[in-house]
Image (cartoon, rainbow, N blue to C red):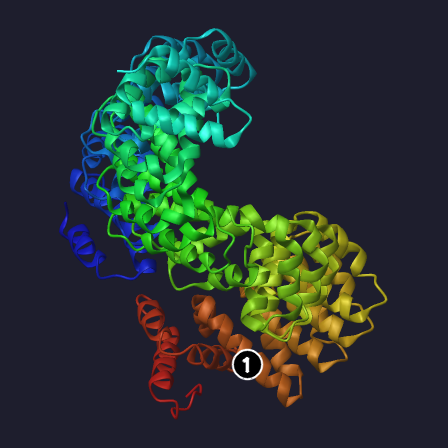
Amino acid sequence: MDPYSQKLIESFQRSTKERKLELLLEISRVRDEAVLQFLINTLGDEHWIVRKTAADYIFSSQEAALPWLSAALNSYNEDIQHWALQVLARMGSKGTPSILRSLKSANPDVRYFACMALGEIREPQGIPPLLKALSDEKWAVRKAASEALVKFGEEVIPMVEQLVTRSTDEDARFWAIKSLGKLGPKAQKILLEALRTGDKQLRYVIAAALGESGDRRVIKVLIDSLADPDWTIRKSAMQALSEIGENAMDLMIESLKDPNEDIRDGCLGAMVRCGDKAWTRLFAFVETVDDNQRFVIRKGLTKLGTRVVEPLVKLFKTGKAEILSFSAATLGEIGSPKAVPVLIEGLSNDDWNVRRSCAYALGEIGEKGVDKIAEALTSPNDDVRYWVTRILESVGEAGMTYLVKALSDKNKNIRFFAAKALGASNNPEVMRDLIHALADSSWSVRKAAFGSLCKLENLSIDQLLRNMSNDNEDIRFWVGKVIEEAGRSNLDSIHDCLRNGNPELRLCACQALGAIANPASTDILIDALRDENEWVRIYSAISLGSIGDIRAVIPLIKGLSDRNSEVHKNISLAFKKLGPRVFDTLEKSVESDDRVLRRNSAIALGEMREERGVDLLILLLEDPDDKVRQAAAEALGRFSGLKAQAVLVKGIHDQSYIVRAAALEAIGEHARPDGIAILTEHLGKTKDERELRVTRRQLAVMAQKIPLSFVELFKNESAAIRTIAAEALSGAGLAIIQILTEAMVGKDETTVFWCQKVIKKVRNPQEPISDA
């Protein structure tokens, strides 16, 4: 790398955002490996626009950048990983091999972004590894792989269907089914058929994915008595059976299949009084029956309430998946907070059905156990954190307080899940915390917070607008995205802020309406062109240009009466966005009875700088109103052709001083060599001191732009002309000295003499200029 580029790179980290962008442009012109390495590192810069610009320059390197991009995928910086994969995705088939290799990375973040990238480029060779990623150990990777497959469309349906029917991995089957559910009617028909004809386990997963010593004769009489209409008889029969105990166990268990609900409930009530041996027999029976029978038993146990919580908790120590699911569901329906710790433990079970059952159970316990449930947000297990955030979300507002606290957790995954879940809150105060999360160091957290803000029912437009000018770049960016996403449905609120807010809020409202770009906002933005605050007027012009409504043209033209130059500038930019319709309107406006509109039309024609506007300005130079003629003359200064200058020569003889002055300034603005003679001649004819000053000033302006044309006048026979030329050059300031010094080389004595006179005059303003 050359020393100059190395010096630029060394100064990069200490530079401002704007300076960094300038340095990137300069550094990227050098094509070597050191520059590519620098650009890769810049993908982790704190400023989004700097990261985006670096990515664009890397993309321009194409094949040369591929090895560096591949290496960047191993970075510990999430932004570098994200942007490297974005660039690879933009490269299409060239970047696909690197993206595919990154799916084998040990870093789950790299695998996550790789899945997203494959979904964007949709190369067929990406389908098999995406299918494999559905069984990834990380939930986020599995989800990203599923979403990527959906983007391929119907071509992946056969392969995903095969995974559903043949895979033994429950996570893979679950996400495959989730993918099919999003692939349209054809795929959904397959799922519906599987629900009708598939095996029990498949139907179970599909449902979750689319939407989760005594005498036998005496014992028999006692069991039948459990159905007696008399409550006291039923109670007594149950008491007797519990006392008989072990000898009654076989018949009680057999009676759990009885169609009579009272008999089933009575047997369960008796068994739970028989101690651990009865529970062991009951659980052994539960293992042998189908789901329907288990459901019936679970309902019976639920009626017994907290008495069965402790035995069910012990059940988790058996390690049998089916019994764990049964126990979790029962504990959830009982709703005792005492079950929370063991259910939390079940969220990390290897069996997906157990995890699902524990999650649903915790959701049923809900607010009663929310404190203990929230403690699991610190779990190192991804699945636990995922399910806990889903549970806290389902609990409602009682869980939102904990999710808000989780936004400050040191673990980015916890922050992500929390930000994602908070979108279900009805508490307006949550919005402040989600906006703060838009500045999170992790892109995934920022994206999740954005998604939740868009979902909030009680979205505070006032608070959202004020953050459009937040000091943090990421917050400004994502708030702008929220405005674009949710603003259309909140237009009335934004309009109200523009009508009644303070200057800062009105400014932000204008910005928001420009981002939304809905024609329904045209009228209120037109009103804002007359706002007392100059920044509101500026942004109303910008937003009207973004909306592109033809109704805004006349008000924008009238807005050129504003004395603020920034307002003028942005009205001109709005005209460019509005396109040829502006000129069509101006053609009509120059003949309007409204003199202000005619004057502003002249200003607009000058700002637009379209050559076809010269004829309209010539027409306005004949206007009876001297301010209209003045504006036309000033506008003609933007057109340096002969036609405009010829008309301006006529303008310097106008009856109005302000028109003559404007014409003189326009000729000076043209800075054409033939304009020197026009101003010089006028200097000799006019007697008006004001015009003399204006003419001399314009000659000095022209001398700054075309100094050599004035140097040529030193050869003129007229001493007066030579003096005028010298005075104009001396008025050009210190910069003219170098030009005159170079101009003297090889010139005649007269030219050298006058050049020296001017240099002396510039250095010493008291030095007289004469021909002697």
Which residue lies at the image location 49% right of the left edge and 20% below the top edge? 183
Q: Position of residue 378 (x, y in %)?
A: 25, 47
Q: Is residue 610 above or below residue 122?
A: below
**Residue 212 location, quadrant:** top left
Q: In the image, 656: left or right of 579? A: right
For label 1, the residue is 696
- Residue located farthest toward the right when viewing the structure as drawn: 593
Of 663 and 483, the residue lying toward us: 483
Residue at figure coordinates x 36%, y 29% from the top left = 356
Q: Is residue 670 left or right of residue 9?
A: right
Q: Secondary structure at mark 1?
A: helix
Residue 275 seen by the camera: yes
Q: Is residue 445 left or right of residue 723?
A: left
Q: Nearer the viewer, residue 324 or 147?
A: 324
Q: Exactly how many numbered labels are in the figure?
A: 1
Q: From the top left corner, tell me how far across and down residue 266 is, in percent.
A: 43, 26
Q: Does residue 133 show up?
A: no
Quadrant of the drawing holding the N terminus? top left
User: Which residue sits at x=71%, y=76%?
Assistant: 659
Front residue of 472/13: it is 472
Q: Position of residue 390 (x, y in %)?
A: 39, 40
Instruction: Please name the residue shown 52% across and 13% down the image.
Output: 192
Amino acid of disc 1: Arg
Q: Residue furthest top?
A: 197
- Does 615 appear above or below 309? below
